[in-house]
Structure formats: C-alpha cells, structure tokens
Amino acid sequence: MKAMIPQYDKLERNEQEEVEHQFQSLDTDEIKEVFKEVYQNPTPVDMGNITEIPYTTPEELDEHMLHEMTLDAMADGQVGVLLMAGGQGTRLEHTGPKGTFSFDGHSLFELQAKQLKAFQEEVNVSVPWFIMTSDINHEETKQFFSTHNHFDLEADNIHFFKQEHFPALSKDGELLLDADRNILVTPNGNGGIFSALKHSGMLEHMKELGIRHVFMNNVDNVVVKVADPLLVGLHIQNDNEVTSKSIEPRPGESVGRLCLVEDQKSVVEYTELPEGQEEKFKNGNIGIHVFNIEFLEKVADVKMPYHLALKKLEHLDDDLKIIKAEALKFEKFYFDAFQIANTHMTLQVDRTGEFSPLKNKIGKDSVETARRDLMDEGLI
C-alpha cells in the first residue's frame, strides 16, 4: 500500500487507519492495469478507417403511428426515463447541482419533469424516472426534489442512484489524497452508468416494473424532448437494442460524431476525425438514446474501457500541502457500448427544438443561448 500512497507515513494514526480501510476496498490490480493500458501504453485507434453510419429522418417515418406506439407502451408500463445529472453548475457560476439551475424560476429538473407529467396525464400511468447523481450532488438533488414537491410527480416513481468512481492517479501511478486526507476518487464517466444501474439495484427494479425500453438523456439540454415518442416508437417498431438521435453539426461544431470505426459503431470526437474530413460526418451525437432492457443487462457486465483525461485536481503534495495540479483522471464513455449492439438505428432531427446545451455562463452554449431557445419554444 505504501508504494501507492507515498504520504502514508506522514499521516496521523487515525488517518492511516481510514486510508487503509479505503485502500482495502479498491481493486488495485485493475488500477494498475488501467494505468498501464490507458496512460503508459495506450493502443491507438485507426482513425483512417472511419465511415458514416446510415440514418433516417422524421420525413421518412409515420410519425402518428410511432407516437401512438409509444403511448401504448407507456400505458403498459414498458417505458422508463434515465437522466444523467451528476454534474455541478460550476461553469455557470451556479452553486449546486446543474439540474437546479433555473430560468425565470423554472429549473432544468422542472422543465423535464413537466414533460413526464404531461405523458402521465395522457396515458394515466406514471413514467418511471431514474436519475443518476454523484457523491457531490446526491443529497442536494434529492432535497431539491423534495422541496419542490417532486414537481407534482409521484415521489415513489422517482429513483435516485449514484454514479460510480475510480481513483485519480499521479503520473507515476500513485494514488492521491484529497484535502480531507482520503484517497481521491472521481466520477468514472458517463459510461459507468450501465454498471451503476446494476450495482445500485436500479436495473433489477426496472425489470420488476416491467420496463422494456429506457430513454436516456443529459440534464443540460434545455429543450430536450424527454421520452420523445418518435424516437421511442422507432426503437420499439424495429426491436432495436439501441436507437440514437443525432443532429447535423454546424461547421466547426465540437460535437462527437456517430460513426463506424473499423466497422464498429462508436462516437468519434470532433478533434479525432481525419484531417480535412471534419465536415464529412453528419451525425452529431447529442446524448439522446433509447436502450432495450436486454441490452442494458448485457452491457452492465461488459468491461468498458477507460479513457484518459488530464485534469487539474486539488490534492495533497508529498508534504501534505494542498495543491491544484495536473493528474490522471480516468473515464468511461457510454458510447463504447454501442460496439456490442446487434441492432442500432439513428434518427437525425433538426436541432431547433431538440438540442440547446447549457455549458457556459457566457458565449457559446451559454445561459443566453439557452434562454433564447427556451423562449423560442415557449418553454419559459
């Protein structure tokens, strides 16, 4: 243990005992393997072999039929909604979970809850809502919902669970200590959602409720169509394992692209596309997907790869002084699971009324642009 925690001998005895307890809960073999495979000896992906994926558009579909198909499935209790809401509003200069950020008194959580309330009134059945939080915002998120009377939804039908974590490391492969002298762990990325569903018991609960189709989205798309009947209906009609929604990116827009990489379905970051071909790929990934329950079961047991992010993290140096310095953060991406999907369709939609991400306080994808789009759609 001391080899992985160089400051161990400088800790007080009670602090050592706590760190020892935390260390025992870690899979050190996995940590060492990830450090070696992701940081020391990464395997490059052949970005020269990327091709566009086929996609359909709303104009090609019978929207009324698919809408009715979705409502029938909802009425039968077969549709659930999965929200990724583990982030804080730091970049918005907002204290608290990002989902609590409000426009004219309407929080991001409320904007999405209103849509579930509308479905409930239409089909006379509550659509189960599963919300993935994180250690840093779990209790505050639950309290926010309680304070706001769960936005007139049934409290028992809203299920909170936490994102999983993985230790941050130094560039020498050592564990780091946080300001409280605990082993520093960070959220393991949105790709950890599948194992988190299983280990939290939420996946089993979905099955007990009879859910067959799960709509997933992020908290910060202010105009998202929650449980979009067109997308869900397309998914049900074709008995897909995964059905994704995309938009055509604007020139130079930094959104990942749904592509085939070496003939495997994936999402490629804009910066990783072959030079000179950035505008060739037309399916921008906006984080909206539908999964069938069998796929969620399958992927929950798949060893998802980690990806490296170099981040300036607050931690203790060798003398137990707090510093903020670059460290190794490891994250999973949910779209790596697409590779094992046997059936995967993509629906490309116009971004208007579909995609308006809230990422920054000012400028691009900001409070100002989000407010404008919310007003244009009559949502505030």
Image (cartoon, rainbow, N blue to C red):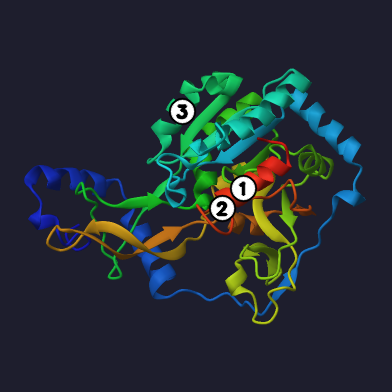
Q: Quadrant of residue 326?
A: bottom left
Residue 219: give x, y in percent of width and height.
57, 42
In the rendered image, is residue 306 in sight?
yes
- Amino acid type shown at disc 3: Phe
Label of residue 269 in the image = none
Q: For mark 1, what is the residue?
A: 370
Residue 256: give x, y in percent of width and height.
63, 63
Q: Residues within 10 Å of mark 1 (few under 14, many from 20)?
A: many
Q: CA distance from mark 2 to mark 3?
A: 23 Å
Is residue 95 toward the left or the right of residue 347 in the image?
A: left
- Amino acid type shown at disc 2: Ser
Is residue 266 toward the left or the right of residue 3 in the image?
A: right
Q: Residues within 10 Å of mark 2 (few under 14, many from 20)?
A: some
Q: For mark 2, what is the residue?
A: 366
Q: In the rendered structure, which disc, 2 or 3, sits on the residue that comes first in sequence?
A: 3
Residue 200: give x, y in percent of width and height.
47, 35
Q: CA distance from mark 1 to mark 2?
A: 6 Å
Q: Residue at x 19, y 63 (%)?
A: 3
Is residue 313 toward the left or the right of residue 20 in the image?
A: right
Q: For mark 3, what is the residue?
A: 144
Picture quarter with the N terminus: bottom left
Q: Secondary structure at mark 1?
A: helix
Asked if the residue under mark 2 is in contact with the one under mark 1, i.e. CB atoms within 8 Å, the reply is yes
- Mark 2 or mark 3, whichever is nearer to me: 2
Q: Secondary structure at mark 2?
A: loop
Residue 218: give x, y in percent of width and height.
59, 45
Q: Secondary structure at mark 3?
A: helix
- Amino acid type shown at disc 1: Ala
